[in-house]
Image: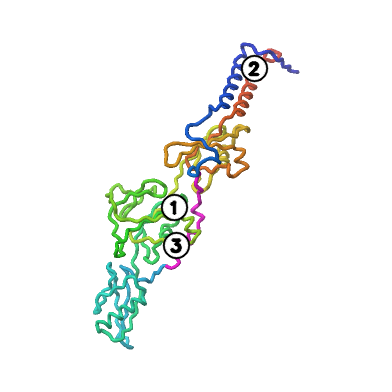
Amino acid sequence: MTIRLKMIPLSRKHAWSRRVFVGLLACAAAVASGCATSSGKHYTHQTMPTQMLAVKRDNAQTLELANLARASNHSDVIDRGDVIEVSISAGLDEKDTVVLPVRVNEQGIAQIPEIGPVPLAGLEPEAAEATIVAACIEQQLYQRPTVTVTMKRQRMNRVMVTGAVKKPDWYELPRGRSDLLAAIVAAGGLDEDAGTNVEIRNPRRSRSGRSTPVASGTQRSIDTVGHSSLLPTEGSTVSADNEFDASVLPVSAGNGMESIKVDLVSATKTGSGGYIVEDGGVVRVEKRDPEPLHVIGLVRKPDRYDFPIAEDLRVTDAIALAGGTSLSLADKIFVVRRVPQSSETAVIQVSLRQAKRNSQANLRLEPGDVVSVENTPATALYEAINVVRFNVGASLPLAGGGVF
């Protein structure tokens, strides 16, 4: 049986199809006149100011942290709190040899029996031996003594490692190896959400060279991620979400801490070590928790997507996350981004065709961006023709009185 289609003029019954067609054409004209706009300043990838550019996101997991090792740690230099062994020999007989364990006090003085106070802090063992010999001769205890100084136990620095490390906690590090690398290693290494910025806060040293004691409590500071945070002190605890419970601790105002900011990318590339962590110091590793990315408009799966922690994301990547564009003609993309140091937003216009061909046009995104694939006169007209074609075609009556 052959079905013949009979084209008939549109009657009142089908006047709504004509109205739909005319209305959609009007919408396309409105788009052409600029109705699809957004508040805020408008830029292109070529005209956007430097401060609006997204920062490249480095992966902290790929950094060679071994390059942070100190070239020379001077671990044999005597310091306050160290325990040394002093051997004084006045002759060849072992009976003429005296072995004395001595602790260097907080003033840098070693109280040696029968000899008295001898300043040894800051001296290497050879220099300390000469200083003790001079003290023996000055007090006429020995004429030509043989002195040997041996390091028995170095003072331990108690430091806090917090932020994006696997085991944030207090750790004891030997004074001669109390640096940034040792602190990160003691805490189990960097966590998966670690950033590349580290803040080291050390007790401020007094004019005598000694560290100012750390007051009990916490001090408020601004970390490298831009959030107000509380620096923990000894005795504070770590909660399950890697934050310190400071609710029961008093807040100490101005406890004399000095801050050092370290960019791990630059530091590992240049091999610049020597980042000392003093007794009572705090190492805070940046923890990345990026805001999600929103992809809307003419895409197959408009939604909110997690922003990768340690990877760059560009416009074409965002479109791919959303399943691609829903119309092949879609080309106009708006990237809505917050203006730095402001509550306003700006719009950066990107061409999808150019982004596929030119890496500079393929704009790097940052957390919190909104990527909107916009309607244009071409896409609006294309949709209008498809809608009318479907409605009109579905409404055409068959020769036998049915509807095709």
Judged left or right of residue 230, residue 321 is right
The kind of residue on which mark 1 rests is: Asn
Q: Position of residue 248 (x, y in %)?
A: 28, 48
The answer to whether residue 184 is seen in the rendering is: yes
Q: Residues within 10 Å of mark 1 (few under 14, many from 20)?
A: some
Image quarter where the C terminus lies is: top right
Q: Is residue 38 above or below residue 245?
A: above
Q: Is residue 97 above or below residue 313?
A: below
Q: Residue furthest right?
A: 1
User: Residue at label 1?
Assistant: 197
Tell me where residue 8 sits by quadrant: top right
Q: Nearer the viewer, residue 254 or 48?
A: 48
Query: Label 2's element?
Result: helix
The kind of residue on which mark 2 rests is: Ser
Gap in angstroms between the C-alphas marked 2 and 1: 65 Å
Q: Nearer the viewer, residue 92 or 58?
A: 58
User: Residue at label 3?
Assistant: 273
Cβ–Cβ below 8 Å for labels 3 and 2?
A: no
Tell me where residue 119 sits by quadrant: bottom left
Q: Nearer the viewer, mark 3 or mark 2?
A: 3
User: Residue at label 2?
Assistant: 395
Q: Is residue 75 above or below residue 260?
A: below
Gap in angstroms between the C-alphas marked 3 and 2: 78 Å
Q: Position of residue 208 (x, y in %)?
A: 29, 65
Magenta span covers which residues? 53-72
Query: Label 3's element?
Result: loop
